Image (spheres, rainbow, N blue to C red):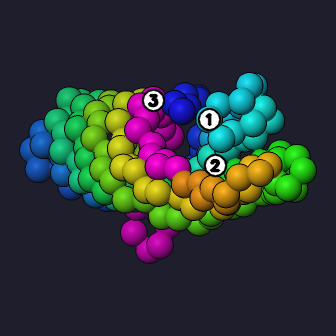
Amino acid sequence: MSINNSSLIGGFQAGYNWQIGQWVLGLEQDYQFTGLKQTATFAAPAGLFLAGDSLAVKTDYLAATRAKIGMAWDRALIYAAGGLETGEFDVTSTYVARGAGGSPVLGFTDSNKLHFGFNVGAGIDYAVTNNVFIGVEYRYLDLGKQTYNLGAFTPAGGAAQTVSSSVGLTASEVTARLNFKLGGLGLFGM
């Protein structure tokens, strides 16, 4: 089963940039909270699955720790970045009743499983003022696959069947960014 989805994601980031001539080096950490959820329901029997059986994957959050290198021109910064990507997933299965001698309606959840992977991307930031920056960034991420235990059911007149599924995430993101330079705002004694 292949699942495709799009979703709105929001979050926050913190980081630090060092400028050496035109070159800029930086470190960033970001957290993204997401409503990304996809449910697939069988419309017709398929193998041991019956019409009405469903599988759902929910992404709780994504986080990235990244290094950045770029070049500054006047008030603009063009950069490339990449690093570690993590994410937490919940996978749920629901099975309809299997008839006489079979399982009743059942539901299982394998939750809070942490995935580790990578991200790479590029973007442009523009300094609207000395302390406020806007930008846009493209990012590709790959969180690899893990196996989720989705319980078991007993078909009518059959032996118990254990269900598992391999779940992963690869995604392309386009992100709008709004950053504030804290040192320039007189915060934290800077």
Looking at the image, residue 5 lies above or below residue 31: above
Name which quarter of the figure residue 129 lies in: top left
Give yes or no for residue 174 being in the magenta stretch: yes
What percent of the width, then of the height, locates residue 59? 59, 50
Question: In the image, which disc is placed on residue 47?
Answer: 1
Q: Residue at x 90, y 50 (%)?
A: 100
Q: Residue furthest top?
A: 44
Element marked by disc 2: strand
- Pointer 3 or 1: first along the chain: 1
What percent of the width, then of the height, locates residue 66? 30, 54
Question: In the image, which disc is placed on residue 174?
Answer: 3
Q: Main secondary structure of the magenta part?
A: strand
Question: In the image, which disc is placed on residue 58?
Answer: 2
Q: Specify the quadrant that holds the C terminus.
A: bottom left
Name the residue type under label 3.
Answer: Val
Q: Residue at x 65, y 41 (%)?
A: 48
Circle 1 residues within 10 Å: few <14, some 14–19, many ≥20:
few
Q: Residue furthest bottom?
A: 189
Q: Nearer the viewer, residue 168 or 84?
A: 168
Element marked by disc 1: loop
Q: Residue furthest front?
A: 157
Q: Specify the quadrant that holds the N terminus.
A: top right
Q: Residue at x 62, y 35 (%)?
A: 47
Mark toward the viewer: 2 or 1: 1
